Image (tube, grey):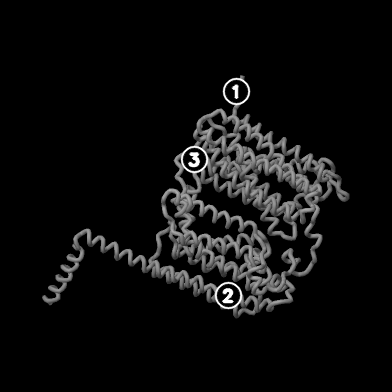
Amino acid sequence: MTQKNPFISRAAVGFALVAAALGVAVIVGMTIGGGAAATSLADAGVVVRWGLPLVKGVTNIGTAVAIGSLAFAAYAMPAKSELLSKTLNLAAFAAGIWTIFGAVTLLFTYLSITGSAFSTDNTFGSSLWLFVTNIQLGQYLALNLLAGALLTIGALMFQSLTATLIMTAFGLIGEIPIALTGHASGAANHAMAVNSIGIHLVAVIIWVGGLVTLFIMRTDDIAQQANLVKRYSTLALVAFGLVAVSGVAAAMIRLGSLSNLFTTYGLLVSFKALCLIVLGAFGAMYRRRLIGQLETGSSRGKTFFRLAAAELAVMGVAMGLGTALSRTAPPFDPLSTFVPTPAAILTGEQLPAELTWSGWFTDWKIDILWLLIAIGAIVIYLFGVIRLSRRGDKWPVMRTVSWVAGWLFMIYITCGAPNVYEQYLFSVHMLGHMMLTMGVPVFLVPGAPVTLLLRSAAKRKDGSRGLREWALWAVHTRWARFFSNPIVAAINFATSLVVFYFTPIFGWATREHVGHEWMIVHFVITGYLFVQALVGIDPGPRQLPYAVRLMLLIGTLTFHAFFGLSLMTGSGLLLADWYGAMGRTWGVDPLADQQNGGAIAWGIGELPSAVLTLIVCVQWFNSGTREAKRLDRASDRSGNKDIEDYNAYLARLAKMEERR
């Protein structure tokens, strides 16, 4: 008799648990929410109405396990281990499910939208191809499908931890189209909706995919199993917080008011929230108690995996309810109150009131993505400082103050008045840009986050890579060494202005949400690398002499000055069909506002530059002082032999001069 493979058996059980719970939740949710009812226009039939959410749910399971298993492996599993190899095989299998059922999802979505029946004739094929190539929804679904197919191949071909991390990043990027097509992404508050869905997707993927992987990859090595559980618990805690915050944000957009919680849509949201609470209770009440017992090889290990099976079922219910919600009409549609003014047509929101001095402090529009990133960066940094303090090591207070101030500044730029008005006033956009690329990095770089991470994080000894190991890997990659080279960083910092504003990239970053977020990332990173090259404390390429650093700084300032002057003296709008078409009835005209933006690029950028110049000069002075002290100590240790040798050298020169 053929012996069963425990890996395959556990994989089958894990997938079956999630899929069965998801299917039940979809059926119940569709029935309660009315998503199963026939549409009055172009109904695609009962097969598509029920088949689309069920197939989409299976696609979501495959996606979560494919990307989540890779993320878990990159963070928790030893390199070149059998465990890593099996996990990559699991990821390939799950990505295959993602690809196959994703193709069916695309087909059913087309049938649902058009209300047509499946056919094998040329007309149907050409119409479907048109949907995939020319309609945005079809393009997004096709891109996500392509990501699944490529991930299937990649997980089979590559077996290293580095490749695992890269594939994880690629898979998460492949989810961006899904975030852009989510059931809340068409809301008037488009940026908040898309970011909420994106954060929710990432958190659910890591949470669900990691748990399925943990459930399947059980090992007889007690220490290794305990490490896997502890590392997953860390990821699950972060995912739990992100799911909670992003879920609340998305629900607020679609519900509109608390009274809508008592609608059928609100009921489904409440059930999903209840699932989240149950999952949080599992983690808080049981996992902490059982992890320690796993390390001792206690029979409680079986209890833990029974708990994991129960969690998988609850996760399946939550995913099923989410799928049912995507097919349920919300009680509040923000677009129902949409007034088609020029500003609203361009931005999706009504033109705000004129910006006043008090508005710089009172006007806010939260970007939940950067708010969470900033809070996370502060919390992780403070956790590292506290760990050092408990160990008896000291960390300079001003580094902590600088780091926290930099992220608080980042929150203001991305969530405060600059975020409210940057779409309507070029001058405000330019102010935010200059602060992102020159202001924020001036605070963040002196915080020396890499140095803190290397000192505070424990070194792993089992061949896996935690935050410390991945940070070292990132610092020493060929790409990092190239782009952090002081000359390259200076060129990138200076030329980014011209490349961004005088090419179609500016239009893309202004009109598209993904482009806007990319712009923030790009300018913060280019500014950070440039400031790091000038005054950085963290490890990196060999630093240039201080005199050369000052020359680089002066050169980039000159470049910024010419750029600012070109805008101040320009007679044409960079984006006339955007800034010139807002219909503003307040403030200066768009061209004058653009010229003000040029003055900001030239003038306001000087303040961070002056700070950088001062820091470089102070470091130069301190370096000379330290070198002098080092030479004095060396002289004292040698009994002033270096001075005696120098005096003898001068005496020989004097004798040679006398002979002449």
**Along the polypeptide, which appears first: circle 1 or circle 3?**
1
Q: Amino acid at mark 2?
A: Ile
Judging from the image, what secondary structure is the residue with disc 3 in?
Answer: loop
> Which quarter of the rendering shows the C terminus?
bottom left
Identify the residue position indicated by label 2 in the image.
600
Foreground of the two, 173 or 309: 309
Judging from the image, what secondary structure is the residue with disc 1 in?
Answer: loop
The residue at 17%/69% (across/down) is: 647
**Along the polypeptide, which appears first: circle 2 or circle 1?**
1
Is residue 380 rendered to the left or right of residue 108? left
Q: Position of residue 532 (x, y in %)?
A: 46, 62
Pointer 2 local density, CA inside 10 Å: few below 14, some 14–19, many at least 20? many
Identify the residue position indicated by label 3 in the image.
79
Q: Amino acid at mark 1?
A: Gln
The residue at 50%/62% (across/down) is: 402
Foreground of the two, 502 or 13: 13
**Along the polypeptide, which appears first: circle 2 or circle 3?**
3
Res 3 label = 1
Q: Position of residue 52 (x, y in %)?
A: 77, 43
Q: Amino acid at mark 3?
A: Ala
